[in-house]
Amino acid sequence: MGKSNSGEEVGLSADERAALKEHLQEKKKAARRMSRAEKEAEAARDVVAKIAEMPDEDRVIAERIHAVVTAAAPSLAPKLWYGMPSYALDGKIVCFFQAASKFSARYATLGFNDPAKLDDGSMWATSFAITEITPEIESRIAALVKTAVG
């Protein structure tokens, strides 16, 4: 634990500690000796299993996002990242789905990390709130993901 500017003790919330614990378990699992293809197949199964565990409102969105991302950008490899479904290119996370239930938020999020090629001038969005999934939203996600991978 550290101290805030006001001298108060600060630390991770229970949700943040849980996410960190999931991340450490993911790294441990990934370190086991397997071929690259075996690791990627297991990682993809882990993503599907994580999505299946989500509350209905998050699961419906996550299932569609997973289908759209894997169809729009087959070069992205599904894997868990801090307990969230994510999609990596050359081992680097390009985008991820954060369920609303993950941190008790009012909406789910589709986020993009630095490797995503979404640059648009001096400022661009890297995170998108999603409250429902529609064909229009799916099209927008597919376009973003295709742009993100170049």
Image: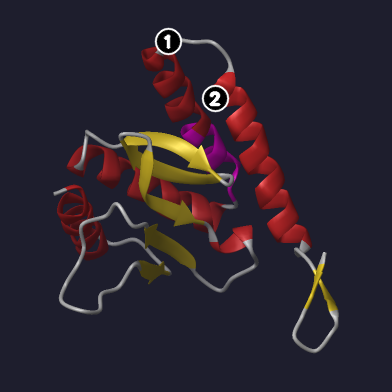
Q: Is residue 101 above or below residue 66?
A: below
What is the x, y in percent for residue 116? 27, 55
Instruction: Residue at 43% x, 69% y: name it.
Output: 131
Q: Residues within 10 Å of mark 1 (few under 14, many from 20)?
A: few
Q: Is residue 29 above or below residue 96?
A: above
In terms of secondary structure, where does tag 2 sit? helix
Instruction: Residue at 43% x, 28% y: name it.
Output: 44
Please indicate whether residue 30 sits to the left or right of residue 141 in the image.
Answer: right
What is the x, y in percent for residue 57? 52, 58
Q: Earlier in the sequence, mark 1 or mark 2?
A: 2
Instruction: Residue at 35% x, 48% y: name it.
Output: 64
Query: At label 2, which amino acid type do we have?
Result: Ala
> Looking at the image, which is closer to me, 145 or 104?
145
Which quadrant: the N terminus?
bottom right
Instruction: Residue at 21% x, 59% y: name it.
Output: 144
User: Which residues are the magenta region?
Assistant: 47-54
> Looking at the image, which is closer to me, 115 or 80?
115
> Looking at the image, which is closer to me, 65 or 85?
85
Determine if the magenta segment contains residue 128. Answer: no
In terms of secondary structure, where does tag 1 sit? loop
What is the x, y in percent for residue 93? 38, 45
Q: CA distance from mark 1 to mark 2?
A: 11 Å
Q: Are marks 1 and 2 in contact (CB under 8 Å)?
A: no
Query: At label 1, which amino acid type do we have?
Result: Ser
What is the x, y in percent for residue 124? 25, 75
Circle 2 is placed at which residue position? 30
Circle 1 is placed at which residue position? 35
